[in-house]
Amino acid sequence: MDKKIEQKFRDWARKNKEAGIPKEFEIFQSAYAHFEDNSDETGFVNNSEVHISTPNLPRPWLHLMANNHSNTRSMYGSFWDQTGKGFSFIDSVLAGPVTSHKDPSYVPTAPGPRDVRYFYLREQVPGHENPDMWFMLPQEGREEAKYTNYKCVMSAGKIQYESVSRNIAASLKVFVTAEDPLEVWQIKLKNNSLQKRIVKLYCGVSWGLESWPSYYFDPRVVSRGEIHKDLNAIVAINGDQNNKHKRTGFMMADRPFDTFDISREEFEGGGHFHEFPQAVIDGACTNSEGVQPYEGMVGVLQFDLDIPASGTVDVNILLGNTDFDQKKRKENLKQIRKKYFSAPGQLQAQEKQVEDTWQAMASSIFVDTPDEEFNRFFNVWLKYQMKNAARFTRCLDAVGYRDVLQDTMAAVDFNPEFVKNQLPETLSYQMKDGRAIRQFSRFPGAKHDERIYMDSPVWIPDLMHEYVMETGDLKILDIKTGFFNLEKHEREFNKQVSLYEHAMLGLKSLYFNRPQKGLCQVGHGDWNDAVDTVGKGKKGVSVWLSMALVFACQKMLPLAELKKDKKGIAFLNKAIKTVTDSINKNAWDGEYYVYAFNDVGRPVGSKKEEEGKIHLNVNTWSLFNGVAEKAGRVDKVLKSIEKISTHFGYLLLSPAYTAKSSYVGRISDQLPGMFENASIYTHGHVFAVYGFLALNSGTKAYKEIKKVFPSNTVNDVSTGPIHQVTNFAVGEAHAHFGKHLYSNFAGGAAWLRKCMLKIVGVEPVFNGLKINPCLPKQWKTIKVQRRFRNTVYNITIENLNEVESGVKQILVDNKPIEGNIIPISKNKSCEVKVVLG
């Protein structure tokens, strides 16, 4: 796709708000890659692969693989793009790199020059003076014409590469194990020629074991390598005792290596640019041990391989994190070797464990609808994205309090064990008055982000409600945890209260901090944390946060009823009514709701202002929390937000802020159309979708959901991986309208799952499954397979009358039931037929 066609598509998109693209552009949707889906024996898509046909993508497509266990620590992950670049890390993307991570963005977007894995091949051809050297995997702009049969396949938990050059067919399969903090590299070299080939293979990484949050002293004098020839392993060590997050990297091969390097300058050679490292040119690594490396540490293993004519050679490597303590490290490495390399079939067993543990999660709910793209993302890719997001909370060096609450909410139905492990830790960073800090560090001694964003605790009830309804586990509400002491900058556990009480304290901190107009104090900020000067004087209030408080109280109410907490029930009902009335009395701007009021009462998001006249979120939340309905304003709100609709979704606000609006906050520093400043923020867009679903507008909700999927754009415009939901698409005010800058970690992905689940309408409640679909009219039949409380429910939903909602009849095992709640079954499976009408 050339630039002229790219611009033509953007010009078309600026004029067309509906989802879908013209046929003339469809050919470009598969120019780089396509999906291949697999279905189980019952017809549900249960696996999906992205097949990439060229290493030359619009930008790196980073694919994340991570452990599947449900612990909150020792969580290992690894990013790989279509050429093998990327990095590995443990427990934190920014604070825990194991290999080099120099991407300047807080969300991995483009690997830095040293964020690479080394895969080189070298052959001294008889009769030739100079050796032939090449990359095992093709690289952009590096002799691409000499490679054929390139393929990269990204799937849940794995990535695989294939290519042929110089009559050597190379393949590489990588996966992160289900339980251990390591990844497996399976390399296969096939000799396609009719004579024996003697090839040298160099493979390795650039280590990234820097101290967190910084070094006390020069890193070169605390870094060293360690060689374990008896284990075919090398180790990279950062000995800085002030490192708050100690990591120790290792590489281990299934066969002896011939030479190795741990010092970068010895491996790569002097200077700053090398087509090939000096060790590859020379034909051997130098066996450098990484002592005081001025260029940093690498981990490179060299293998001299004899490949018979038409034969193959396999090399298997483990890369990961091991123990910092020397004695424990040696024992750990011995155990790893025994587990992975002591008997045939061990690697295959580990790969199968990855597949099985993932399928155990993915099979919590499958759907089969008339839309294969909907099925693919519902059944596979959104779960996969949220499994990883919940574990690493959007890549940050610290865990965002409100972020992890939303990300784990999206994993409740398929990974409740992880949610249960994470929730008490998260709530322990709440203060006794109910407020919470912005971000907490997982590593003892490292600093927390102690800014007070007042919306942090408002997300607790939604997660807690979803967990209890899914699992029936009321006991979680009684688990006790401590509080964060803001003066001491640490948690205290001498006075603990239940998680239920933590949630109630959070709501009360909002309700009893309403300094003007009966609306909630904004503090340092709310959801839109770029609007961060509204509450500098502690009197600024957020209308959106007040909307969110109403919704949170509504979510908390069923839990209070299950707890038979009469005082809590009374408080929640009072808060809902009082705050709803205050919003409708003081925040209506004639056609829509104002976003906030600053310390002196100046409105933000008002038609009176020159910029940022309308904000999306405050208005869409009024649709699903009932505030707009209470005042008879639903139609006006709907009409207003349609004015900021685009082909790629709803703008977060309009018009964009510029420097003249600095009174609003750092949002005015952002380029118009970027991030929170009038982009199509996926989070905000799907809030709107959730609002449409609350109004039973299934067709409208479905059309808007389709706008965030790859079928609504082309790769050269979006540029991002087709199997991941982006954080935002660049807005109309920017020349790159429709571009996706971020992938893997997107706050909106959790709420997108929430919306898609609401369309399907098989909703867990404490005493069963509530059947409440909200479908697009054109869907005549959908099937749902739902695992709930040890029973698999096979559900067929018929919509022959082409309605959007309303259950006419439910048959459970051929017997009609009253109402729309299927009682909890004691059987292993249950057959359900639902008729809408």
Image: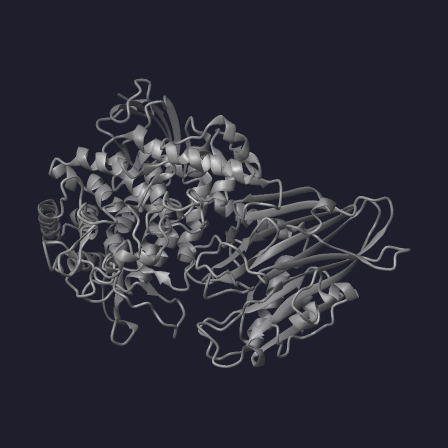
Report x, y in % for residue 753. Answer: 36, 41
Residue located farthest toward the right when viewing the structure as drawn: 127
Left or right of 157, for residue 416 = left
Residue at the top extreme, as displayed: 801
In x, y percent, where is residue 436?
25, 63
Image spot of residue 183 (x, y percent)? 58, 57
Does residue 789 appear in this view?
A: no
Q: Residue at x 26, y 27 (%)?
A: 805
Residue 705 against residue 803 in the figure, above or below:
below
Quarter residue 251 falls in: bottom right
Between 242 and 137, the one nearer to me in the picture: 137
Q: Is residue 201 left or right of residue 620?
A: right
**Camera-nearest residue between 487 and 764:** 487
Asked if one can make out residue 378 in the rendered structure from this viewpoint, the answer is yes
Residue shown at 25% from the left, 59% from the top: 525
Instruction: Using residue 394 as the reference point, say whether residue 770 is left or right of it.
Output: left
**Would residue 126 appear left or right of 373 to someone viewing this image?**
right
As rendered, which of 83 and 425 lies closer to the eye? 83
Q: Quadrant of the N terminus?
A: top right
The image position of residue 173, as x and y in percent, is: 63, 49
Q: Quadrant of the C terminus?
A: top left
Figure disc tally: 0
Q: Is residue 226 above or below residue 455?
A: below
Tell me, what colour scheme is on the image? one colour
Residue drawn at x 35%, y 53% is 419
